């Protein structure tokens, strides 16, 4: 005979739970007790963290604005995790704190590095706030690791920043030396051109030729020795003489032009012939040099001056980075020694144990109902049997049964309250007062 399907109301499930409440209370009590034991047995882990504010330096010199001499912090933040958790940084951390004192093999060292990388967490909060945290079993060790890795990060970034600027300065100085050499070579070429022009009309024994050869020889030795300083007055004896010679050359040109226009070329030749040969050679030579070397030397000097400007800019940038106007690293929240462990999470463990015990209790109640075929009332019996139910006899309860039931209820209630109180005290101590 097929068993008829008996539909139950929600109140029937509530009665079922209360009827078999011990199947829920006992698993809950056991599960909570296991959770309390787990909270005290599981290894404790402590977390220490720090926050770093990275501020870009304010550009106060117009020469620095728009010049990419130093790498910005925004570009370095993209590879922040790789910088902090890189092999060199972690190895430096291990050496500073002597974390490898118990390491005996290379494999143990590799495992130590992997464990540190796994335990150190780096997060970016906003555009310029960096969070670094570490999770470990020793509270003092966690604080020292966070503090040390923070110092390593700041020192490394400042070192890289200064190294970039120093590299720029070194490069510019090298280029300046190259262009100084070019200017010196241009000076020698100009003198050589002057010598070639003199040899057209003069003999090698002419005083001007001899003097110019000596100057070329001296300049060549200076170039070979690395003395690239160029004197603008090497053509003349001094700066004032150079100015006077230029004025005389200008006057002479005007006189020649005026004489040619008036047709008095003979008088002009007489005036030129009566002039000092040395002065005349110098005047003509000055004109030749200015015309021949103006283009190349002008370009070289322009590049040289631009490099000087860049060098000054780089040096100013370096001074700014070394001062309070450069990139600043401010520790907003320094690493502190944690007072309480973050793992195991006692409230979460106890809550999960309570939930697990309650679910187990509900499962036991369901199984008990499935395998319990007794009738709880006349209605269940009537729905089960095809035969009519003629009557039902209630359970006869005597006064002694009532007294025994009352005593039993008192004992059960007392034990339940005692167990619940003990569990509650243990839970409160572990969650709120325990370390």
Image (cartoon, rainbow, N blue to C red):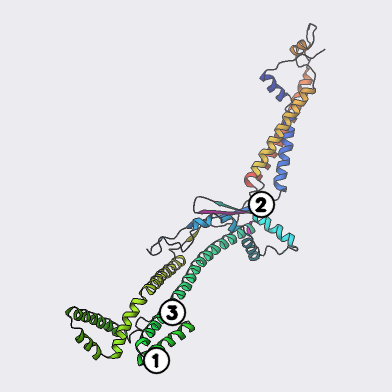
Q: Earlier in the sequence, mark 2 or mark 1?
A: 2
Residue 69 to residue 385: above or below: below
Residue 204, numbered circle: 1
Q: Residue at x 21, y 79 (%)?
A: 257
Camera-side residue: 8 or 25?
8
Camera-side residue: 237 or 414?
237
Camera-side residue: 32 or 404?
32
Q: Work out whether residue 429 can be spotted.
A: no
- Residue that protrudes farthest toward the left in the picture: 262
For label 2, the crowd category at 10 Å Cα-Cα, with few meaning under 14, some 14 to 19 and many 20 or more, is some
Horizontal side, residue 86 vs residue 181: left or right: right
Residue 185, numbered circle: 3
Which secondary structure lies at badge 3? helix
Q: Position of residue 58 (x, y in %)?
A: 41, 60
**Magenta region: which residues?**
124-140
Between marks 3 and 2 in the image, the one whose residue lies nearer the viewer: 3
Which secondary structure lies at badge 2? loop
Identify the image quadrant of residue 365: top right
For label 1, the crowd category at 10 Å Cα-Cα, with few meaning under 14, some 14 to 19 and many 20 or more, is few
């Amino acid at each position: 005979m097929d068993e008829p399907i008996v539909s139950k109301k929600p109140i029937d499930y509530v009665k079922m739970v209360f009827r078999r409440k011990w199947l829920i209370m006992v698993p809950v009590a056991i599960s909570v007790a296991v959770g309390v034991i787990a909270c005290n047995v599981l290894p404790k882990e402590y977390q220490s963290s720090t926050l770093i504010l990275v501020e870009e330096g304010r550009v106060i010199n117009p020469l620095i604005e728009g010049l990419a001499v130093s790498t910005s912090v925004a570009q370095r933040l993209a590879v922040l995790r790789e910088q902090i958790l890189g092999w060199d940084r972690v190895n430096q951390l291990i050496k500073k704190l002597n974390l490898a004192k118990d390491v005996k093999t290379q494999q143990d060292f590799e495992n130590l590095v992997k464990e540190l990388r796994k335990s150190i967490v780096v997060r970016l909060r906003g555009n310029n706030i960096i969070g670094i945290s570490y999770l470990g079993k020793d509270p003092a060790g966690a604080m020292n690791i966070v503090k040390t890795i923070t110092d390593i990060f700041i020192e490394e970034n400042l070192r890289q920043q200064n190294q970039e600027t120093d590299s720029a300065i070194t490069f510019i100085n090298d280029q300046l030396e190259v262009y100084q050499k070019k200017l010196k070579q241009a000076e020698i070429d100009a003198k050589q051109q002057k010598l070639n022009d003199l040899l057209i009309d003069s003999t090698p024994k002419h005083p001007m030729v001899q003097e110019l050869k000596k100057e070329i020889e001296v300049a060549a030795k200076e170039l070979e020795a690395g003395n690239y300083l160029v004197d603008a007055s090497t053509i003349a004896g001094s700066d004032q003489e150079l100015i006077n010679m230029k004025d005389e050359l200008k006057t002479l040109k005007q006189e020649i032009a005026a004489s040619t226009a008036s047709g008095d070329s003979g008088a002009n030749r007489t005036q030129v012939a009566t002039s000092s040969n040395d002065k005349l050679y110098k005047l003509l030579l000055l004109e030749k040099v200015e015309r021949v070397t103006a283009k190349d030397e002008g370009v070289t000097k322009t590049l040289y001056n631009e490099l000087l400007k860049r060098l000054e800019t780089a040096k100013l940038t370096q001074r700014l980075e070394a001062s309070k106007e450069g990139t600043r690293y401010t520790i907003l929240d320094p690493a502190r020694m944690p007072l309480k462990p973050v793992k195991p999470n006692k409230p979460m463990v106890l809550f999960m144990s309570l939930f697990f015990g309650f679910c187990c209790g509900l499962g036991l109640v369901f199984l008990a109902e499935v395998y319990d075929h007794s009738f709880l009332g006349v209605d269940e019996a009537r729905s089960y049997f095809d035969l009519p139910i003629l009557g039902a006899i209630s359970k006869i309860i005597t006064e002694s049964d009532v007294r025994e039931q009352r005593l039993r209820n008192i004992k059960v209630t007392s034990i339940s309250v005692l167990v619940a109180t003990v569990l509650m005290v243990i839970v409160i101590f572990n969650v709120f007062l325990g370390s």
